[in-house]
Image (cartoon, helix red, strand yellow):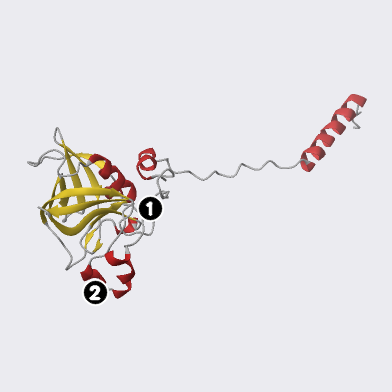
Amino acid sequence: MTRNVTRRQALSGGLAMVGLALAGCSPTRTAPAPQPVRPPVDRDFILNYGSRPNEEFPLPAIDPKVLEPKFRRMRVAYQSNEDDGTIIVDTSSFYLYLVEPSGTAMRYGVGLGRQGFEWSGRARVAWKRPWPTWTPPAEMIAREPHLEKYSAENGGMEPGLGNPLGARALYIFQGNVDTLYRLHGTNEPASIGKAVSSGCVRLINQDVIDLYDRVRPGAKIVVT
């Protein structure tokens, strides 16, 4: 039996075919590419170790991958029989503590003297200098003659980012005698937590600036 196709049915069928054809030609929508997950911003690290453009010699920011979290500056609970304002260097843990009231201390990670160049004892901070000149002692020049050009007689090494004393230096005396040891900055942040220096105690430049601002000349220092 032949089925009669009405005009309305023919039109609706034609429109359906057109719709299918158009659907086949339309561009396929692709899913948006996944966005990389950005690590959270460590605002405390940026505050403590960001760039210092206003320094006499502008300091670059410290790469957080270079400075282990345990050696970053922080205030910690700390009990001590020493007076407030005393500097205590714990050579066994590569920490420097600045004793504060109420059982706290500001703690800094440090680099220390390599074997044969360690120093320990009690002394005082005789004075401190921003962006100091470096004058290697005669014993160091004897071991490394190329440093003769920086001797005291030749005026030492000018301040700057390449100067081994970095952005600040605190000079350690026992009585009226210069120990020739210093608390100072370093342009080698990867050396923090290691025994690499010629006996001095080195800190990240940003940390030695913070310490410099907190320490009074004459403050006691204890290196254990």
Give residue 161's position: percent from left, percent from top. 39, 56
Residue at 17% x, 51% y is 89
Q: Tell me if residue 215 comes above or below residue 143 in the rendering.
A: above
Question: Is residue 151 visible to us here?
Answer: no
- How many C-alpha atoms fall within 10 Å of the one at disc 1: few (<14), some, or many (≥20)? few
Instruction: Name the amino acid, label 2.
Output: Ala
What residue would you read off at disc 2? Answer: 142
Q: Amino acid at mark 1?
A: Lys
Left or right: residue 7 versus residue 48 is right
Q: Pointer 1: what residue?
A: 65
Placement of 105 over or under 118, stated as above or below: above
Question: Would you say the residues marked 1 and 2 are in contact, meaning their CB atoms lie under 8 Å apart?
Answer: no
Task: Name the residue: 16% across, 40% down.
Answer: 85
Q: Relative to 176, does residue 211 appear above or below in the rendering?
A: above
Instruction: Give the left or right position of residue 30, taking residue 45 as reference.
Output: right
Q: Report x, y in % for residue 223.
A: 13, 53
Quadrant for the C terminus, please.
bottom left
